[in-house]
Image (cartoon, rainbow, N blue to C red):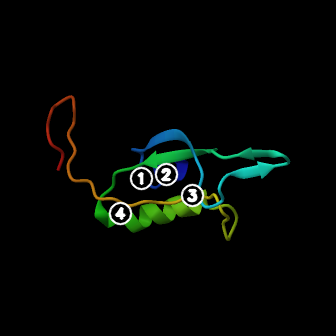
Amino acid sequence: MKDLFNAGFPAVTKLSVFGRGKQRGLKVGNVTYDELPKDLLIIVIEDKDKDFVVETIIESARTGAKGQAGDGKVFITPLEESYTISSGKKNT
């Protein structure tokens, strides 16, 4: 999140979540952890900034030069509308 802030994208929502990916959890000795702690970031950006923001996230989240399983995913989805609650106005 610090790298996004420094790149001019300060508005981020961060949630602590639990889950697993293709690695199906983690086994340490006789103990299997089916759900691992993860961070979920939600950020709304303009289309023109997408590639830059995605690359910033990938560079910040990747483990080492080549990365590894469990580093995470970036999902892109369109946002149809948003409203500011205090004013009740639709954002453009």
Q: Quadrant of residue 62?
A: bottom right
**What residue type is disc 4 on?**
Asp
Look at mark 1 in the image and give the residue it sits on: 8
Look at mark 3 in the image and give the residue it sits on: 72
- The CA span between labels 2 and 4 is 14 Å
Q: Earlier in the sequence, mark 2 or mark 4?
A: 2
Which type of secondary structure does the marked residue at label 4 adopt?
helix
- The CA span between labels 1 and 4 is 11 Å
Point out the frontmost of discs 1 and 3.
3
Point out the frontmost of discs 4 and 3.
3
Q: Are marks 4 and 3 in contact (CB under 8 Å)?
A: no
Q: Position of residue 83 (x, y in %)?
A: 20, 40
Q: Are marks 1 and 2 in contact (CB under 8 Å)?
A: yes
Label 2 crowd (10 A; few <14 / some 14-19 / many >=20): few
Look at mark 2 in the image and give the residue it sits on: 6
Q: Are marks 2 and 4 in contact (CB under 8 Å)?
A: no
Q: Is residue 23 left or right of residue 90?
A: right
Q: Earlier in the sequence, mark 3 or mark 2?
A: 2
Point out the frontmost of discs 1 and 4.
4
